[in-house]
Amino acid sequence: MNNNTNFFADGKGPAAVLKHGVLKRYLSKFAGATSSTSPGNRVGFLDGYAGEGEYVNPTTGETSEGSPRIALKIAADLRDLGREMRTVFVEKDKKAFTSLKSVVDSASDPHAVALHGDIAQHISGALIHFQNMPALVFLDPFGSALDHATTVNAILGRPGTQPTELLLNFSLQALRRMGARIYEKEGASGRGATLARVDHWLGGDWWREHFQAPEILALPQKDRPHAASLRVADLHASRIRDATNCGRYSVPIHRRPADKPIFVLMLFYPRQIAAFPFNEAVSLALEDWRKFLHEVDLAEAELADRAAVALISAAESTRIQFEADEAAIKRDAIHSIKNAITEALVTRQRLSVRSELSLVMGGALGIGRTLHLRAAWKELAKEGIVTDCPKGALDKAVITKA
């Protein structure tokens, strides 16, 4: 993001709250867990589209953390534990890189590196910093990302025995914009180059048939790019998963609940153990996002109250509605988990939370977390459907039919 004003004024703020909420929680968990057993207690983090590092709200003057600042704080926490997190930040835009370099330098971290240029040119050299250590790679482009082959081979196919995970923020809005050019007449200025760029990004022209599928073409013209992009994003994630034998977890990112998603945040992981903590991070980040939107609505309501007199203020109504909505989300999550577990246990005796998380959480995946799972489990135990819920952590627990 090269313009701080645009970051807050164009509605990207809420999406960033969600994205960064996931990143800070999951990177902390990943780095803490893997560095506890890795050679030399070391772990790596690569941020391929790092941006400025932090962003200042031009209206309030408040600073918001970008992904580099988040990572540098986690690295400092690990140093206090006697561990080491090596960080590499790459940024192509010259102005953004200048700000990034200042953020990195201010951290006084001997294991933090800022590189100017395109991640495609830096990827091999950047990953050398993480030899013989686990690593999380974060790619958050504003348009097309690294090409499919590099994603599969250089990142998830990184040599060695240490795990590599990829957190990819896939831009639906970029694919909608670029892919929509397939509906233009052949020979239109720039059409061929744009479509070829998408081919390179997604690993071939396979995506074109989905933009031109009969059911997509039957939609109103304005709706075609979005519907096609959702399908292609899902297939793109499946292609990466199948090529690397990794698990995948996808999170749609919206500015507001009723808006079309603008990104899909995708985690690719070689070990099933990653799914549970990532789901926890997603659930908590969604809570942050809802609170952020509530605070925006509350500020608008307070302004309205100054210009009107009512029995119940707009601000109070906004607070009441938010609390009711949050309570409903909790109830719905517990209900969804109960239904999912009950349905799954029709044909089996037990469910592993670690390896069968999607079956356990059902429609609450991403919304629910340990809090909701424990409540659902206790209710099912009281109803005589499952055995008692354990008191400790649930990530390794097995749900057994009563």
Image: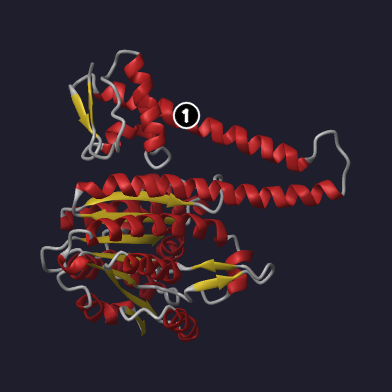
Front in this rendered view, residue 110 or 98 = 110
Taking the image as shown, residue 345 lies to the left or right of residue 299, namely: left
Q: Can you identify the residue that label 1 sits on?
A: 332
Please tell me which residue is depicted at 29% across the width and 32% down the height of the picture.
360
Provide the secondary structure element on which disc 1 rests. helix
User: Residue 279, image x and y in percent?
Assistant: 35, 45
Q: Residue at x 40, y 69 (%)?
A: 141
Q: Give x and y (percent) for residue 13.
A: 56, 61
Q: Residue shown at 18%/22% (left/top)?
A: 349
Relative to 337, residue 165 above or below: below
Q: Amino acid at mark 1?
A: Asp
**For the view shown, which residue lies furthest in the top direction?**
384
- Residue 204 visible in image: no
> Residue at image x 43%, y 40%?
367
Q: Quadrant of the C terminus?
A: top left
Q: Is residue 233 above or below residue 81?
A: above
Q: Nearer the viewer, residue 161 or 31?
A: 31
Q: Is residue 104 left or right of residue 393?
A: right
- The answer to whether residue 346 shows anywhere in this view is yes
Q: Residues within 10 Å of mark 1 (few under 14, many from 20)?
A: some
